[in-house]
């Protein structure tokens, strides 16, 4: 009986010990988790999308309801129905789709740009409306083209974004300072070597100092941060063009074109946003 | 296995089960909640959404009010300068996306704000004899 009691108490002690060990392990894991989230891990959210594509689609949607383009019946804007008279006034150039290959048509379109209430800042917004029901083999399709210019702003320029991103990513950790000192050392050795070959010991000293400075400056930021800032600051239209090989929203949105006699033609409104921000 | 009773074995299995549950059930859920919150509240996402809402409000053919609250937990300092939304998040936690974001929009007003410590945005488009009128306001909601 006594032996049984002893064995049972020994078992309980072992169980408590195992539970405590487990709890300790959980505590260690929880502490590590908290440390990762609060100190080590700086969470960055990366939203992958084509801004340029969205800008072109959004602007096309706005233009489909624009009172100076859309047909107004009884004081109500008929969204998506564009009036020919308004298109004639709105467009910088009216012609055939075949004219797009002529340089004077394109230059006229760009020179006679319009400043309307809409348009993205630091961008050229090229709006093309094509009447598909007018398409003929020999003359092409009737089209209206105009260029809208948004306000200019220093705030959103790519170089500003790049500098701001770099300043936000300047770190003061021991690893960063080790990298900078390493850069200084490597630059100093190379600069000193070149300086020595050119002008002896004095050249080595000057070359070493210059090399150290250049090495220090080029390693001020982590290469990953520079790459991230460069990609983020690159104009979206350029990014889109480089990845897809075409302008965003090249297919456009469907629309109806209303002629003075009341007849309706099917067409498309195509908006290309070229941003240099 | 000398001295290891059934109770010991149950205890050890219990601890292993607790750790297993933590790693495969609780930990992913916590992580998912955090990632979900950050993806909704990061400066990049909120600035993009706000700029897009301002632009598409122009597509409305009648009076419209768009209300946008990314998450009540996070506030922002925001202003519009020459049709560019500039947004800085204010996180109360130590972790999170601290960087700011700038995003362009294509409709008036060219400038709005600055609004400090806000988490709800109101984008209004109204029509009058003079034409369309756009107003952007923001406030802190609990």
Image (cartoon, coloured by chain):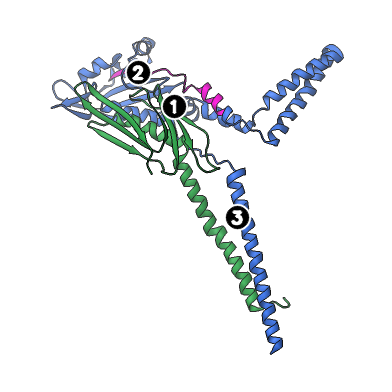
In the rendered image of the structure, the colour used to display chain B is green
Q: Is residue B57 visible?
A: yes
Task: Please say if A29 is above or below A109.
Answer: below
Residue drawn at the location 27% of the way across and 30% of the way down: B125
**Circle 3/circle 1 CB separation < 8 Å:** no
- Nearer the observer: mark 3 or 1; the answer is 3
Magenta-colored span: A142-166
Q: Is residue A133 visible?
A: no
Task: Please say if A31 is above or below A203.
Answer: below
Q: In this figure, which residue is indicated by the disc labeled 3? A: A30
Q: Chain of mark 2?
A: A
- Nearer the observer: mark 1 or 2; the answer is 2
Q: In this figure, which residue is indicated by the disc labeled 1? A: A246
Find residue A83 and report its horizontal and vertical position in percent: 20, 22
Q: Do marks 3 and 1 share a subunit?
A: yes
Find residue A28 and report its horizontal and vertical position in percent: 64, 56
- Dot 2: element: strand
In whole angstroms, how far apart are the C-alphas of marks 3 and 2? 56 Å
């Amino acid at each position: 009986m006594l032996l049984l009691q002893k064995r049972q108490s020994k078992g309980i002690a072992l169980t408590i010990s195992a539970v405590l060990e487990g709890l300790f392990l959980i505590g260690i894991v929880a502490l590590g988790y908290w440390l990762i989230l609060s100190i080590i891990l700086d969470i960055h959210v990366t939203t992958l999308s084509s801004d340029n594509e969205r800008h072109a689609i959004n602007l096309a949607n706005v233009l489909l309801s624009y009172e100076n383009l859309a047909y107004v019946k009884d004081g109500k804007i008929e969204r998506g129905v564009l009036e020919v008279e308004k298109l004639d006034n709105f467009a910088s150039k009216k012609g055939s789709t075949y004219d797009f290959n002529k340089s004077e048509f394109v230059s006229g379109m760009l020179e006679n740009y319009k400043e309307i209430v809409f348009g993205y800042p630091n961008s050229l917004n090229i709006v093309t409306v094509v009447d598909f029901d007018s398409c003929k083999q020999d003359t092409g399709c009737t089209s209206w083209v105009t260029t809208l210019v948004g306000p200019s702003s220093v705030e959103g320029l790519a170089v500003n974004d790049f500098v701001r991103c770099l300043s936000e990513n300047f770190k003061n950790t021991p690893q960063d300072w080790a990298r900078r000192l390493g850069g200084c050392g490597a630059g100093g050795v190379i600069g000193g070597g070149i300086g020595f070959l050119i002008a002896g010991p004095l050249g080595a000293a000057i070359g070493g100092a210059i090399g150290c400075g250049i090495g220090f400056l080029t390693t001020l930021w982590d290469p990953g941060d520079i790459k991230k800032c460069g990609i983020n600051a690159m104009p979206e239209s350029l990014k889109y063009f480089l990845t897809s090989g075409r302008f965003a929203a090249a297919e456009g949105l469907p629309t109806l074109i209303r002629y003075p006699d009341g007849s309706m033609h099917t067409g498309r409104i195509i908006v290309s946003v070229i941003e240099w921000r | 296995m000398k001295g290891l009773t059934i109770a010991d074995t149950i205890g050890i299995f219990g601890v292993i089960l607790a750790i297993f549950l933590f790693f495969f059930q609780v930990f992913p859920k916590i992580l998912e909640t955090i990632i979900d919150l950050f993806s909704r509240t990061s400066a990049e996402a909120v600035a993009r959404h706000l700029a897009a809402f301002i632009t598409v409000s122009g597509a409305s053919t009648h009076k419209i009010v768009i209300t946008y609250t990314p998450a009540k937990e996070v506030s922002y300092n925001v202003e519009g300068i020459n049709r560019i939304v500039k947004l800085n998040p204010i996180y109360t936690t130590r972790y999170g996306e601290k960087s700011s974001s700038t995003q362009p929009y294509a409709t008036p007003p060219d400038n709005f704000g600055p609004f400090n410590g806000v988490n709800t945005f109101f984008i209004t488009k109204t029509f009058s004899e003079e034409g369309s009128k756009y107003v952007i306001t923001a406030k802190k909601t609990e």
